[in-house]
Amino acid sequence: MCGVFGISNNKNASELTYLGLYALQHRGQESAGIVSCDESKFYSKIGQGEVQEVFDRESLSKLVGINAIGHVRYSTYGTSELKNAQPIIVKCSKGILALAHNGNIVNARYLRNKLESQGAIFQTNTDSEVILHLIAHSKEKNLLESIRKVFYKVKGSYSLLLMTPTTIYAIRDPYGFRPLVLGKLSRSYIITSETCALDIIEAEFCREINPGEILEIKNGNIKSYNLINKNFDFKVDERLCIFEYIYFSRPDSILKNNSVHRIRQELGKYLYKELPTSADLVIPVPDSAISAALGYSSISGIPFDTGFIRNHYVGRTFIQPKQRIRDFSAKIKYNTVKDVIKNKRIIVVDDSIVRGTTSKKLIKMLRCSGAKEIHLRITSSPIISSCIYGIDTPTKKELIAYNYKVNEIKNFLNVDSLHYLSIDGMVAATQIKKSCLCLACFNKNYPVK
Ligand code: AMP
């Protein structure tokens, strides 16, 4: 769970990166960083916290140069501390390099042990640093060839940016688990995790980076290469993470030519189609389920209303890694609009149930506010397995749907009915071929073991 942004050939590179990171803040709130480059030297500002806490006018003004890359982080591998914040900068046999990575390297532990046994000294405990060590160790003189060689060994998900003093490389794994898009602003190219980061700087969306593509951006020109060639012959097998649609991406982003908002509306419509239910109101759990509840309301004819108010000055519940903080913020995050709820039969739409803590609390609040009936509708299937490709899901033992059947969850949450969207319903709503999606957290079918 991270966001990346890079821009080349722009005299305001660091300011634009800062704005891009603002738009990507939902992808990670633990740390933020920008590295800029003026063709010989790197300048950096990296800190713990949200974008607005890390940068100010003065620190940004020191990030000179026409190229920059930036990162917002939420850790799925490695601890939450400053030394693990990105971009990571290293000086190595290939010169000075900066790396910003979204994804999760599944064989990082194995690769790290191997590198350490050869004498490598790691500065961080992130999976991303492994990539830089492998590049540094590579005997290839040509950086492009060493990138190919390294990513032949590295398994898992990566949508990443690698900056040298003259060039930015954008690299997306052969499965395309995490999004990565190309945009243009006058004579500058931009690579970023989501299109909402292009909108904020009024850049035009060009296309997605293809799974298994390396894009080289230098002096305002781009060249596309395949990660794979005759020496490094592995397969491109697209598997976009469906959870990007369900929860993670911003609804105003475009993912595979479809607005995330539209797809979420479709998810809501499929929920009604699978189990039509009569009720007085449809209410979303804000913010992630608003689009889906609108879709549910439009197809069912049941009025949409605002039953929960979310306090926007509290971070996302789940996003804080410590259980203690998560519970605390869940409590202060939502309140009900009692006037809307009282004596009503309510459809509550949410995107997912992970541990069940949030739903349990919200349902209790609705009961206390006088709801007559509560029908909980979830736009994803039961999450029965952890994500190993960069979405923060807890270990499977903590997943409520791993431990209990739907009927038991219904009783635990104290709702009148509970329906999770089927896997086929989710897939149909995305309008993407099932074989091109990663559904591992729902069906345990892990594309990379
Ligand atoms: P839980 O209380 O553990 O069941 O969390 C479920 C709530 O967390 C839902 O309302 C989701 O919107 C939200 N959520 C689901 N997945 C994630 C995630 N990976 N990171 C942050 N929040 C999430």
Image: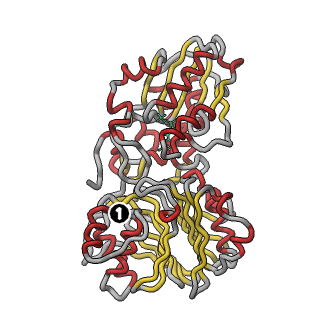
The front one of 150 and 317 is: 317
Residue marked by disc 1: 174
User: Where is residue 140 drawn, in percent x and y?
Assistant: 32, 85
User: Where is residue 371 drawn, in percent x and y?
Assistant: 60, 14
Say which quadrant the C terminus sits in: bottom left
- Residue 83 shown left or right of residue 130 in the figure: right
- Residue 218 shown left or right of residue 60 in the figure: left
* In this view, 323 is above or below 55: above
The front one of 333 and 173 is: 333
Q: Splitting the image into 4 quarters, where does residue 423 fall?
A: top left
User: Where is residue 29 drawn, in percent x and y?
Assistant: 57, 53
Residue at coordinates 67% horizontally, 58% vertically from top-left?
53
Residue at coordinates 66% horizontally, 14% vertically from top-left?
342
* In this view, 59 is above or below 256: below
Number of marks in the rendered image: 1
* In this view, 65 is above or below 201: below
> How are the residues colored?
secondary structure
Which residue in the rendered view is the most extreme toward the right?
A: 57
Mark 1 neighbour density, 10 Å: few (under 14) some (14–19) many (20 or more): many
- Residue 296 in view in this figure: yes
Q: Amino acid under label 1?
A: Pro
Residue at coordinates 52% horizontally, 42% vertically from top-left?
263
Query: Which element type, helix, strand or loop, lies under badge 1?
Result: loop
